[in-house]
Image: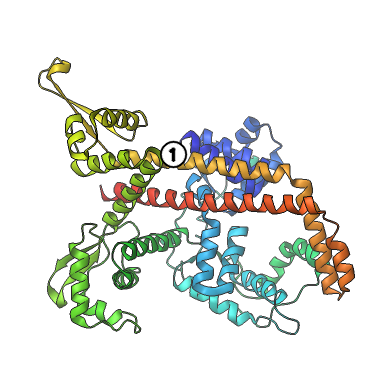
Amino acid sequence: MTAQEVRLCGLLLQEHFGDVVEKVGTHLIRSGVLTLRALAHETKLALDLVKKSLCVLVQHGMCTFGPGRRGPAGPVEYRINCERILHMLRYPRYIYTAKSLYGDTGELIIEEILQRGQMTMSSTVKTVADRLTHNMPEGQSMDYSEVVSAFSRLVETHFLQRCPPMASAGSSSSGAVDTSLPVVTQPAEPESNPECYKLPYINLTGQGKRRRSSEDGEDDQRAAKKAKTDNSQCGDEGIYWQVNFLRFHLHFRDQAIISAVSCKLDQTSSEIVRTMLRMSEVTTPAHAAFTQALSANEIFRSLPSNYNIARPILDQYLTLLVDDPMEFVGKTGDSGGGMYVVNLHRALANLARATLESVVQERFGSRSARIFRLLLRKRHLEQKQVEDFAMVPAKEAKDMLYTLLSENLVQLQEVPKTPDYAPSRTFYLYTVNQLPTARLLLQHCYKTIGNLIERRLYETKENKRLLEKSQRIEAILASLQATGAETAQLTEVEEMITAPERQQLESLRHHINKLDSSENQVDETIFLLESYINSTQASR
């Protein structure tokens, strides 16, 4: 873990769970593996607070525990999952994707499970149905069966999966606090469970209940207490579900590839690639470099009905995709009208390369970007060759190369003619190594998104009083509207916020929205670079 990743993990934990969980999580990141008592001693926090913090982290899959160095008889040791913490950056994107694919019901299902870490199916269905009913016009309600249907579709497409069962290996004979949890031989992977995507039968009929506004706070407090009694009546007690982040990431990767093909060629080409990805999404392993081979006949039959493409036109499009320099699609055989695959690794490499070129162009100008692209294409060039090929004056080319070299975006390789490395008998070649450069840019992105979060938290803290006042007035207005108050009363309440305060609120909301949008954009870059780095490591 780099310093920037540790800082970002700490900010995310603090924002979502508070200062105590942030302190425990950050200390675990820096220390690696610790027992409960060692963690409480080193953080100087009360044992009860450390226990609760670990419970929160375990509930959200951000912390694992297992037997320590002394084996099953020794105290349980805890370790943090930093990758899972960084997934919190994409919570808005996960929720938006669920909304675009499965509507409001799918959005609320994913939102509830992300908020609580893991939930039973019956508890999720009831909570989501109640929320949907609360937002419906008076007299209407959401039936449980509709929410169950949306939940089932999310499981069938693997966006939700069962939490792995805990493989208990017995407990220690000592009465120490550290061994109060069951000892786990190895943290199980969800995919290793044969019933990972098997829906339980639940005895659940009825409709969502509408909450009265005065009872909102009380209902939230009672929700956890009611969960146990509710689950015991539905038949799915002990079966918890969590969000399958890998499946969402594969969907994001596919969407990025489809968007790139659409920009480079046209909409029809992107629809052909979309069809190929959809056909092979179940049969292709998560970290495969290529999709499963598909024949042109299969692709033709699977195209959407609204695309009336003749078979010869499809063959021309496939040939165009295969011959394109981006190499998104490859041809592996001639049977069945031709066997085609989507080259996932090459697609991610090209997307990462375009991102690097864009960063260089925005930071150092179009001429530096031209030199950078030239080095990516030609691999190794001397300074004189760079000047000639890039058609840049010698002085400017020298300055640009040294600037890129100082930022570690370009590397200098020495090739001596003699063993003494004499400068007069040594070739100095400039080159760009895409993988280390992508890792460098990824760290810059972590730093950037950490700065954005800090700025957003600072803006919110500085205007805390005004925000609280605005929320109180909005609550009063909602209550008056629900009771059918007159327009004069509503206007009087609205005027409790003065014109300068209203202007300040608008400015604050504009800044916060801009910071949120920037965070999402930077996270898209982080996702592309992480996908490329992971794909490169898996293909080696």
Residue 199 seen anywhere in this rendered image of the structure: no
Residue at horizontal 58 percent and vertical 49 percent from the top: 515
Given residues 64 and 247, the one toward you in this image is 247
Label 1 crowding class (10 Å Cα cut-off): few <14, some 14-19, many 20+? some
Q: Is residue 105 left or right of residue 342?
A: right
Residue at horizontal 39 percent and vertical 52 percent from the top: 528
Q: How many marks?
A: 1
Q: Check the image and name the residue furthest to the left.
A: 417
* Rendered position, 200 above or below 217: below
Q: Which residue is mark 1?
A: 443
Secondary structure type for disc 1: helix
Relative image position of residue 348 (x, y in whole percent): 32, 54
Relative image position of residue 202 (x, y in whole percent): 59, 77
Scheme by which the image is coloured = rainbow
Q: Is residue 159 left or right of residue 468?
A: left
Residue at horizontal 64 percent and vertical 32 percent from the top: 43
Residue type at numbered disc 1: Gln
Relative image position of residue 492 (x, y in whole percent): 88, 63
Image quadrant assignment for residue 419: top left
Image quadrant assignment for residue 417: top left
Q: Is residue 223 left or right of residue 269?
A: right
Residue at horizontal 64 percent and vertical 53 percent from the top: 510
Residue 343 seen anywhere in this rendered image of the structure: yes
Relative image position of residue 384 (x, y in whole percent): 17, 30
* Rendered position, 414 above or below 8: above
Q: Is residue 389 left or right of residue 363?
A: left
Q: Check the image and name the residue furthest to the front.
A: 393
Given residues 503 and 258, the one toward you in this image is 503
